[in-house]
Image: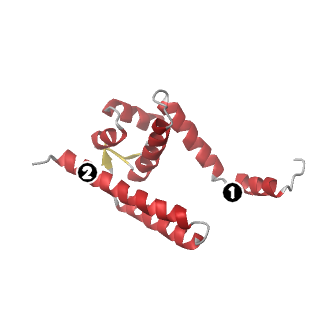
Amino acid sequence: MTSTLEREETQVKRLFDRLDKVEEVAEKIEKREPREAASLRGVMQEALEEAGPVRVSVAAALLDFSDHTVRTWIEEGLLTAASRRPLRIDPARLHQVLHLVRDLRDAGQRRGLLDAVWYRLHDEALLEQADLQQSLTEMRKGDLRPG
């Protein structure tokens, strides 16, 4: 018989695996069918919003970290607390951070993950800003003019 924690971990892992498959399809069709890709991403977001908050121990198992490290990452703002008592983690942010951690580990990085994830999240937030997007588009078109 499996424990409640094992069942929860399995449920979250299965959800994330399904969402990863949907994301793969969205990425493949992005250029040909941008509306459909956006629709798939909307479905992903809805699924994450409907998922319940994740226990620290489940997040730790998924990230392959200790509970202490996960709590530190919450304190540092890398993971978002969905509730404080009991302490639970927002599944959307956990999914995002899990991808970043996997990418960094796949690239051979084992130490300094907190800083590396923090910088990646910061970079992603910057790239989502409308004014930066506009500036990058203008730059790519060669529409350069002094500030």
Crowdedness near tag 1: few (<14), some (14–19) or many (≥20) residues, C-alpha within 10 Å? few
Q: Nearer the viewer, mark 1 or mark 2?
A: 2
Work out whether 35 lies above or below 88. below
Give the Cα distance between marks 1 and 2: 38 Å
| Left or right position of 52 against 95 | left
Q: Identify the residue position indicated by label 1 in the image.
A: 130
Q: Amino acid at mark 1?
A: Ala
Amino acid type for the residue under numbered disc 2: Thr
Front-lying residue, 131 or 31:
31
Q: Residue furthest left?
A: 1
Question: Which residue is nearer to you in this view: 71 or 45?
Answer: 45
Q: Secondary structure at mark 1?
A: helix
Identify the image quadrant of residue 60. top left
Does residue 95 appear in this view? Answer: yes
Q: Residues within 10 Å of mark 2 (few under 14, many from 20)?
A: some
Residue beneath label 2, please?
10
Tag 2 or tag 1, which sits nearer the N-term?
2
> 17 above or below 88?
below
Q: Position of residue 136 (x, y in %)?
A: 75, 53
